[in-house]
Image (cartoon, coloured by chain):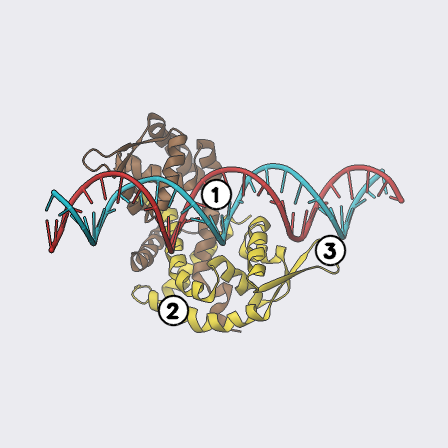
Chain colours: A brown, B yellow, C cyan, D red
Amino acid sequence: MHTELQLDNQVCFRLYTATRLITQAYTPILTALGITYPQYLVLMVLWEKDNQPVNDIAHRLLLETNTVTPLLQRMEKLGIVSRRKGEQDKRQQIVSLTPKGKELEEEAFAQIPSGMGEKLSACPLKFEDYQRLAQELDSIIKTLKK
Amino acid sequence: MHTELQLDNQVCFRLYTATRLITQAYTPILTALGITYPQYLVLMVLWEKDNQPVNDIAHRLLLETNTVTPLLQRMEKLGIVSRRKGEQDKRQQIVSLTPKGKELEEEAFAQIPSGMGEKLSACPLKFEDYQRLAQELDSIIKTLKK
DNA sequence: TAACAATAAATCGTGCACGATATAAACATT
DNA sequence: AATGTTTATATCGTGCACGATTTATTGTTA
């Protein structure tokens, strides 16, 4: 028996599981808003800076365009973003928030922080723990990125 | 601008990204062994204890059977596990390692710890950091589970 | 400027995740 | 024993992720 290969010793399995469970916690809130978690990530990118090409959105989320393009097509069908050809560079698709996409920011602000805070209220982690967690995850991400 | 809704302030986005990047780091090693990351998780469960019903495997991985069943069907097609009806309870499918599935443990032990250690060698986190990280993820998992 | 290389998106195929539903076997209750 | 309920697994549909390829446009260089 190789203890290195035991599930209980795997940080990665915990990351994978925690990510899935947190995403599941988001789901009912996001479903009420009519979106999914990856769509919420795209919206956060656009709320921060509207009118971005597909590449910039993908780069911000560390995703490939072959993931983001279909995601944006679904979001366009939902009426929360629009896409148009870039003027200086016609290869680009510039993605913009529709009025509906902009309104979602207020709904998200009203529902998500409180809703998620409630679901995690039983968790013993403190603010400083989450901060250090974020820093440690950043150092893993920085190491593996690109 | 609601700072709560900024990507940079989201622990969840970091979890999601770190999980994807670590899984990507596993991929070339696992591909050489002919398996995927979720299949590797199932194998770890079976290396620990062979001949388990689908439900127990799913429960150990905190996954639903509608995820695990197709996963096991693919693994059966690859010849690394076999499935047979339970004898006392005919609703169950008992999953067992084939000789090929057992051999994979040695190959995994030879390739994965060293391969992943190398990829993460540039990461500044120390053993204690990973330990605390694991504990903190466990408390998130415990809070959100079921 | 004609040919070639690089870049931005899109498309295709496969494998998860997961909600919803279906099916069969076991269990429980009348 | 017949009926209803629970349980174990499977099936179906949708939405990611992502490797591989394609297409259109831009840029580069002979």
Residue B130 showing in the rendered view: yes
Query: Which of the two marks, 2 or 1, is nearer to us in this view?
Result: 2
Q: Quadrant of residue B4?
A: top left
Q: Nearer the viewer, residue B73 or B115?
A: B73
* B128 in relation to A56, above or below: below
Q: CA distance from mark 3 to mark 2?
A: 42 Å
Q: Which chain is indicated by disc 1?
A: A
Numbered circle sitting on residue B90: 3
Q: Which chain is indicated by disc 3?
A: B
Pointers 3 and 2 within a single chain: yes
10 Å crowding of disc 2: few (<14), some (14-19), many (20+): some
Helix, strand or loop for disc 1 = helix
Callout 1 amino acid: Ala
Numbered circle sitting on residue A25: 1
Q: Nearer the viewer, residue A29 or B18?
A: B18
Q: Position of residue A142 (x, y in %)?
A: 29, 57
10 Å crowding of disc 3: few (<14), some (14-19), many (20+): few
Q: Position of residue A66 (x, y in %)?
A: 36, 45
Q: Quadrant of residue B126?
A: bottom left
Numbered circle sitting on residue B37: none
Helix, strand or loop for disc 2 = helix
Q: Nearer the viewer, residue A124 or D10?
A: D10
Quadrant in which the N terminus of chain B is drawn: top left
* B80 in relation to A18, above or below: below
What residue is rendered at 29% in x and 47% in y? A59
Residue placed furthest toward the top = A99
Horizontal side of residue B68 vs A141, given as left or right:
right
Q: Quadrant of residue C12?
A: top left
Question: Mark 2 — residue?
Answer: B115
